[in-house]
Image (cartoon, rainbow, N blue to C red):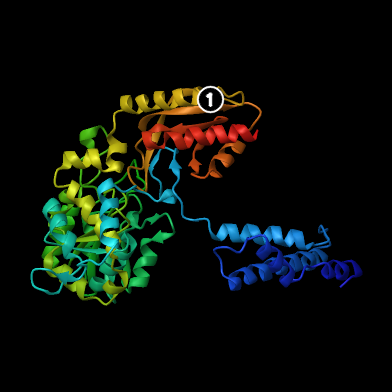
Amino acid sequence: MNEKTRELLKTLPKIDEVLLILERDGALKGVSRDIATEQCRKTVEEMRNAILNSEKIGGKVSGPFSVDKAVQEVRKKLLALHKYSLRRVVNATGIILHTNLGRAPLCGEALRRIIDVSEGYSNLEFDLDKGKRGIRYDHVKDTLCCVSGSEDAIIVNNNAAAVLLVLNTLSEGKEAIVSRGELIEIGGEFRIPEVMEKSGAILREVGTTNRTHFFDYENAVCDRTGLIMKVHTSNFKVLGFTDEISLTDLVKLGKEKDIPVMNDLGSGCFVSLDNYGLEREPTVQDVLKTGVDVVTFSGDKLLGGPQAGIIMGKKDVLARIKKNPLNRALRIDKLTLAALEATMMHYLDLDRAVHDVRVLRSLTEPVSEVRKRADSLLSLLEQLSLQSMTFSIIEEYSMAGGGSLPTQEIPTVVIAVHTHGISPSRLERELRKLEVPVIARICEDKVLFDLRTIPEEEFMFIRNGIQHIAGLL
């Protein structure tokens, strides 16, 4: 250790000194002394490491390290502890099911049900009619089955869990037959082959990436086969010289060979989106009509509910899945259940669901209505009369996101922010720093606010945020 390093280390403040100043200034309110002491230790340790690391790489480090500097750093840490990390943001990207932004926003009734159920006790696993222990799935099972035509339903914490649970139950130690063209990967490194491996199922690939024939499945069936699996490639499409076998044909093969057939549907749509000018997405109802033994899908994608993995299908098959010990480890909590039940009630009337479930409303809303909101927001922003920014309306395209409708471009209207004296990237960063962050996108040196994903009640977050940022320039 050189002399300069030793001298800098001597300037490190004492923890008791830092604590004393913080206590005198009232900065320890709302935090225990033990936590404050630990934050002081961390800060001084960071200062010490900065000095030692600087010597190792031959760099420079600013010093000396005064008590005031340490107090300032600890104060920042204590303030950060009281600031929520998980926060509401404005999704101005135009990606309706934005995985990084929490996918589907919940409908109002789902939010009210969460509060109502969580404020006190609930009959989560208590049968009020019989006065004895009940089953948590039963609170939403009847509605799911009524809307879909399924015999039974189980709900776990996400679709990856649903796929894992089904594979483990029906094909552990046995082969699961899947087309090579359906061995998908979705966001978050969810890969079908790796989930199969963890489940204990043995992957049996058939066909090729672009073409899989009926005889490929038929020839693969043997005494080691536990399951035939079809995966909906919801986040990409293979075009050109392609061929795949329908779920109906696979169900026939499964019945003939007495092998269960599973369909990982992924997005879980209950509404015929092609009726609204969008691409055809297979609905849960259509899939179940094929006679498939079990289907799995997400609750927070096209369904528009909370994060959940929904398993539906034949009663005898689902009875086996329910008995799997993994089921308890993967089950949902009462808040998710409350939100899912409230969301599914909207689907008793599909027209009502399209209007009340925000994801469906965003997907199907006429572009003329989107333009009306754009005009309103533009008026609010122009009233600010800013010199650093001007605004205009541009026609653009939104995306469904969340691994749904991968090639569908949805006409939309955006407000383009033209910056003067500030770069678009700087504005985009400042928007993310707001109390209610606004997440936008940059295109051709303009920051864009896509109105397809911005409801009117969020306009003031954008207007006030822009005004705040302009004041910093």
Above/below status of 104 relative to 396: below
Q: Is residue 41 left or right of residue 365?
A: right
Instruction: Identify the residue at horizontal 11%, vertical 74% (top origin).
Output: 131
Find residue 137 and report its image quarter: bottom left
Instruction: Identify the residue at horizontal 55%, vertical 29% (top origin).
Output: 444
Give the residue furthest to the left.
130
Q: Specify whether residue 382 is in view.
A: yes
Of residue 360 and residue 324, the one placed in the foreground of this image is 360
Of residue 18 and residue 397, the one placed in the foreground of this image is 18
Q: Specify whether residue 216 is in view.
A: no
Above/below status of 317 relative to 394: below
Find residue 19 and report its image quarter: bottom right
The x and y percentages for residue 322 are 20, 72
Above/below status of 446 relative to 181: above
The x and y percentages for residue 347 are 18, 47
Of residue 115 and residue 225, the one placed in the foreground of this image is 115
The x and y percentages for residue 321 are 21, 71
The quarter in which the N terminus is drawn is bottom right
**Label tally:** 1
Residue type, numbered disc 1: Leu
Q: Is residue 110 left or right of residue 448?
A: left
Above/below status of 284 relative to 161: above
Q: Is residue 120 left or right of residue 36?
A: left
| Residue on which disc 1 sits | 384
Of residue 211 and residue 442, the one placed in the foreground of this image is 442
The quarter in which the C terminus is drawn is top right
Q: Secondary structure at mark 1?
A: loop
